[in-house]
Image (tube, rainbow, N blue to C red):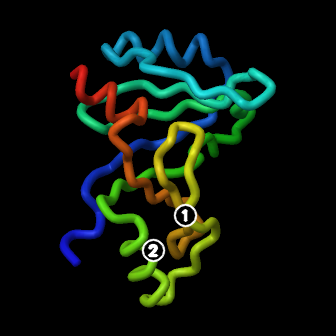
Amino acid sequence: MGKMITDMGHTAFAVHDMDVALAFYAKLGLTESFRLNHADGSLMLIYIHISGDRFLELFPNGPEPESGRTHSFRHICLLTADIATAIETLRADGVTIDREIKEGLDGNLQAWFKDPDGNSIELMQLVESSPQRQTALRG
């Protein structure tokens, strides 16, 4: 197998006020690319395009910044070209897979595990029809 990880897909944060967060990232020249909603229509998350296949993923209902709780970090997403082989290799190397391969709301394949410090890692294989890939193709 070649290199297992091909790129960083996204870093995810839970934000306290989505409008304030979007305005802040717009000051950096980073704007909303697309949203994913729960089955009931409520907002699940917003993707902000950085470059290529790289995004910030913002979830609503994060902690108040003044609360002293600064743990808005949710997870990092690493991209792979072959998720089935990557998961098989990780499992053989003793990594516990918390959530097996499944299709996400965006159509991509994903699986989940944790690093030794308990940080969540999403492993994702992008499909050509996904909003991430379509955004990357538009530039």
Structural distance between the alpha carbons of marks 1 and 2: 8 Å
- Residue 47 rendering spot, x and y as whole percentages: 48, 28
Foreground pick, 8 / 118? 8
Q: Report whether residue 65 is seen.
A: no
- Helix, strand or loop for disc 1: strand
Farthest residue in the front direction? Answer: 129
Q: Amino acid at mark 1?
A: Ile
1 to 56, vertically: above or below: below
Residue 85 position by quadrant: bottom left
Q: In screen coordinates, is 102 left or right of 25?
A: right
Residue to which mark 1 is pinned:
101
Label total for image? 2
Q: Which part of the image, by quadrant, shows the C terminus?
A: top left
* Badge 1 vs badge 2, beta-carbon distance below 8 Å: yes
Q: Could you tell me which secondary element the residue under label 2 belongs to?
A: helix
Amino acid carrying mark 2 in the image: Ile
Q: Tell me if residue 5 can be seen.
A: yes
Residue 115, position as x, y percentages in the image: 51, 70
Residue at 40 percent of width and 12 percent of height: 26
N-term-proximal mark, 1 vs 2: 2
Q: Which residue shows up at 80% across the image and 26% down it?
A: 40
Question: Which label number is shown at residue 87?
Answer: 2
Instruction: Name the residue rendered at 33%, 39% in the picture.
Output: 128
Quadrant of the rendered image containing residue 119: bottom right
Local crowd size for mark 2, using a 10 Å CA cut-off: few (<14), some (14–19), many (≥20): many
Residue 95 against residue 65 in the figure, above or below = below
Q: Looking at the image, which residue is at 29% across and 59% down?
A: 81
Nearer-the-camera pick, 118 or 86: 86
